[in-house]
Amino acid sequence: MSVGAPAASASPAERELTSRNGVPHRFRHMLATEPLTAEQITFLLDQAAPFQEIQRHPLKKLATLRGKTVALAFFEPSTRTRISFATAASRLGADSMNLQAESSSLKKGESLLDTVHTLNAMKPDCIVIRHGSSGAADFIARHLEIPVINAGDGTHEHPTQALLDALTIRDRLGRIEGLNVSILGDIDHSRVARSNIHLLGKFGCRITLCGPAMWLPRELEKLAAPGSEIRRVPRIEDALDGADVIITLRVQQERMNEPALPVDDYVMLYQLTPERLALARPGALVLHPGPMIRGLEIDPSVADGPQSCVLEQVTNGLAVRMALLFLLIGVSGETSKPENTAASEATLERKKDSTHAAD
Amino acid sequence: MLRISNGRVIDPSNGTDAQLDVLIEGGQIRLAAAPNDISQAIANANTSCEVFDASGLIVAPGFIDLHCHLREPGGEHSETIESGTRAAARGGFTAVCPMPNTRPVNDNASVTRAIIERAASHGSVRVWPIGACSLGSRGEALAEIAAMKQSGIVAVSDDGRPVATAKLMRQVMDYCGSLGLPVIDHCEDVSLAAGAVMREGETSVRLGLRGMPAAAESICVGRDVQLAELTGSRLHIAHLSARASLDLVREARDRGLSVTCEVTPHHFTLVDEDVAYDTHFKMNPPLASVEDREALLVGLADGTVDAIATDHAPHEPASKAVEFDKAPFGITGFETALALAIEQLYHSGCISLLRLVELFTTGPARVLGMERSIVENAPADLTLFSLEREWVFRAAESASKSRNTPFDGHEFRGAPMATIVAGRVVYQRQPA
């Protein structure tokens, strides 16, 4: 697989997809930020810009994906991400099919593979999956011909969250390159943290991870992309010193049950308070992937303060997801076969080698 | 009579490495000697004699697999004694030791007898069952170990899980010491390993998969070694995967304790970095770190490791076609074990041919308190293999009922060529 120069016979639609420097970026799936290049990420964010504009229009509905169907397969409870994808599809004119774990046949013992094959038999144009098992999106992508978007897999990745975070950061600060980004909380169990670490690393960010030691395995430092740096810092005051961006993660209280840390200790040591925020660079951004628990990981005055980007993140999530749906099924699905659209190095399509023949 | 001619006989029991012919009669080895002497013996016997041309092949004592799962009784959709032993024969094994975690568990003499009878009527190779240490392998009451021994078990283990408590392990070791049976332990601190699906490390952190640290294994090895010292009984560590565990075994042996260990082909071939959500790379103990693999290679070379054991663990395809964390642990191993050992250990220059053969023959035999050699009156169990035969392993062509292997499509140099059990050729690879 390689990134080729645009073919001379490229359709207008394909040319439209061409970024400013003339390299086409086509994505077969969106499974993770880890394999993406900075250039591909920049291209995706550029593609999202016009969709941000649309969110401000009084009439927000386009016909771009009219006749297309997006399958939403959420095997884990989710409100905001599912609504965001459903709204993104709807504003592009696409229909969506909804599968929710509570009402699905998974409860009756059906395997994930059978469930997605069933969904696929209803001929959606792409599938958005949220699942509690790390690697679940990768797993179904190996078995389906249609594009798969990972809306969060276990504690692995949540790529669209990192993309919307990057869009938010770029809008506010004008760049992503070289920023000091501090991520606070349960890093080890956070797919948002992993996707952000990989994405921001591609732009040479200096990433500081801070949280209770049992949630900060030292191997996290090895996730650093070339030219970036990851450090683990136990004290929040040190972690915030000089930060341009602070990403506060939700404290998953269910994790507290594995003998980990009493909530009161967490609040005392790691809550993002106005006093602590003052240690960061003036105007430092505060991001939170939601759902946010005020008074636990974040002080309400910070959550509602001028540095908070929480609601912008939600709006930008729509733009990023619209751009992604447009890129995945708006053009490539009509103009070429799946094999041909796999040309991007970002493609995470695993070769269907014989190892999987038994599947 | 059957004459194995023109082969290179390797017998670690007496250090033999010579071009010898082997004459078999009545299920036993009659003579291993120079071709002229064999011809003379045949002439004297004045009976007809079949000839098996072993030109270019290694003729070794029959291979023993100390650790496998044949799934019968109770798991016949994944494997049966018939299919499993056929796969074993294709891998060059003449005897295999199935672990007791069947349904029902092999914790009493009637299950032991059922397995042995089934193997006698349907098996391609010898089946030497391993009995459970505790009833149901639940880690509470002792199983009927003496009765099972009378019915034919060769060792005890609660494999799949560790012997639950130090107290029970002590009892089992004391008891088995008096019965002359080795105790095989699957070493795992279950609290450290709870919920883990691979080895803890950079890869588990990157993939977001729950990992168990190497210490989950070595902590339990440490417990067992101390109990071996306390009881003076024989302890065998199953599928050892971590450097720290190996160090404990080495040190125990230096102190004169009867502690042995086995290593699987997948642990000396693959590492945790190879895991990429492919459930065919999920087994327990999980694939270890690069450093651990290197330590295992050292242990295989310096004699600390006694045996290569497959931990052949068949699972029907549907059970592995699931999310990584939901898949069962284990991969098949009979048909790839020798070829992996030749590739990873012999062709790489890590160990000698004599040592390679030892790890499949006299090594595991010693663990069981048996002998294995190509001498007069020994059982005519022989494994013939090639160091050069090139072939491709195809899971779909496996004799096993399951397909869960990470080595499907792998190109090998070196292969089992014929398996002889009690003088009968139970498997012969097609000529190239």
Image: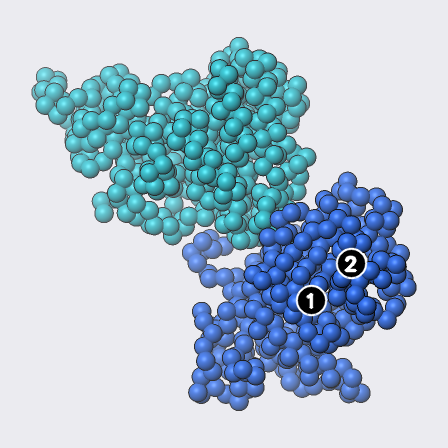
Q: Chain of mark 2?
A: A
| Residue that badge 1 annotates | A179
Q: Earlier in the sequence, mark 2 or mark 1?
A: 1
Name the colour assigned to chain B in the rendering. cyan
Q: Position of residue B88 (x, y in %)?
A: 38, 36
For the residues beneath circles 2 and 1, the answer to whether they share a chain is yes
**Where B194 sits versus B327, above or below?**
above
Q: Position of residue B107 (x, y in %)?
A: 56, 23
The chain in blue: A
Q: Give the image quarter of residue A7.
A: bottom left
The amino acid pointed to by label 1 is Leu
Q: Residue at x 54, y 82 (%)?
A: A21
How far apart marks 2 and 1 lie (CA) works out to 13 Å
Whether residue B145 is visible, yes or no, is yes
Q: Badge 2 local density, few (<14 within 10 Å), some, or many (20+)?
A: many
| Image quarter in which the N terminus of chain A is found | bottom left
